[in-house]
């Protein structure tokens, strides 16, 4: 992203996202030796599938309304048509979707393109208080990382590192995202180590958890920001990098200390 692509700092909150498909994507760490740059583009295959399904729904709904049908059938046709239109709009938004995040010289620049066009804003890095690791579950999605043909009904869990804004949650940015969640790794580790394979069977889970930890630590070092951990009152407090391994152990309860 070049400097000329971003507008002057916006006044007010960061804009909310527009039409987007529920596509689950990984977000890896960028090169940490200079400016930190993330860029995500559209999932063309998922958008094409949703657009096709939406177009079929609109076609069936409109053709039903053109016939002499009962009130119940007409209502169902209207619902089918509206659902199809929403799906097509979401697919178009996904085709257009592009997100760029750049952090350099104490400034955070964000540019997002969607159905409504480009939305850009800038903010000083000082407006962000730290990096919060989160486990997240998605119950509906189009595709997920590593399984391009994954079922629409499958549940996906993610481990996410969020750059938390001090005052406005709309300005939060996801800087790292990977599957599965830490809690899922914990469950997988417990099952594998309890099976015939013994402790060696959980090694892959332990390696994944260490990669999560290393990614979080690398971002903390690069941005010179603390880790934010949840408190009992629902808030967050800063934790030093030296406490990061303790946080991972607390997050997993009785799981193996290696996680």
Image: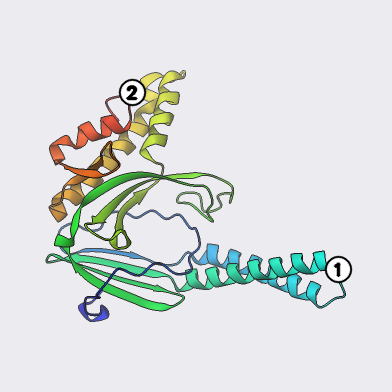
Q: Nearer the viewer, residue 72 or 179?
A: 72
Which residue is pictured at 55% across the width and 45% down the height?
154
Tag 2 residue: 254
Closest to the camera, between mark 2 and mark 1, is 1
Residue 185, given in percent of the width and then of the height, sits at 39, 34
Residue 13, given in percent of the width and then of the height, sits at 29, 68
Residue 55, given in percent of the width and then of the height, sits at 66, 71
Quarter placement of the C terminus = top left
Q: Is residue 119 left or right of residue 131?
A: right
Q: CA distance from mark 2 to mark 1?
A: 60 Å
Rendered position, 139 above or below 108: above
Quarter placement of the N terminus = bottom left
Which residue is pictured at 30% across the width and 75% down the height?
120
Tag 1 residue: 70
Q: Is residue 61 left or right of residue 157?
A: right
Residue 133, given in percent of the width and then of the height, sits at 29, 45
Q: Secondary structure at mark 2?
A: loop
Q: Nearer the viewer, residue 191 or 134?
A: 134
Q: Secondary structure at mark 1?
A: loop
Which residue is pictured at 18% across the width and 61% down the height?
127
């Amino acid at each position: 992203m070049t400097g000329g692509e971003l507008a002057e700092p916006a006044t007010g909150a960061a804009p909310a996202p527009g039409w987007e498909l529920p596509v689950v994507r990984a977000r890896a760490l960028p090169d940490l030796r200079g400016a930190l740059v993330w860029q995500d583009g559209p999932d063309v295959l998922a958008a094409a599938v949703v657009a096709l399904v939406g177009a079929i729904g609109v076609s069936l709904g409109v053709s039903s309304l053109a016939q002499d049908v009962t009130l119940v059938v007409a209502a169902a046709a209207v619902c089918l048509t509206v659902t199809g239109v929403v799906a097509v709009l979401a697919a178009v938004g996904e085709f257009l979707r592009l997100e760029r995040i750049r952090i350099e010289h104490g400034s955070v620049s964000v540019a997002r393109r969607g159905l409504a066009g480009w939305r850009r804003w800038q903010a000083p890095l000082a407006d962000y208080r730290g990096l919060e690791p989160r486990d997240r579950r998605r119950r509906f999605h189009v595709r997920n990382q590593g399984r391009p043909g994954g079922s629409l009904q499958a549940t996906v869990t993610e481990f996410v590192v969020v750059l938390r804004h001090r005052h406005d949650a709309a300005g939060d940015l996801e800087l790292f995202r990977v599957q599965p969640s830490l809690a899922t790794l914990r469950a997988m580790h417990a099952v594998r180590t309890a099976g015939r394979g013994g402790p060696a069977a959980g090694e892959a889970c332990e390696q994944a958890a260490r990669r999560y930890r290393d990614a979080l630590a690398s971002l903390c070092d690069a941005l010179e920001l603390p880790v934010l951990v949840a408190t009992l009152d629902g808030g967050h407090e800063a934790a030093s990098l030296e406490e990061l391994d303790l946080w991972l152990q607390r997050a997993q309860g009785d799981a193996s200390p290696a996680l």
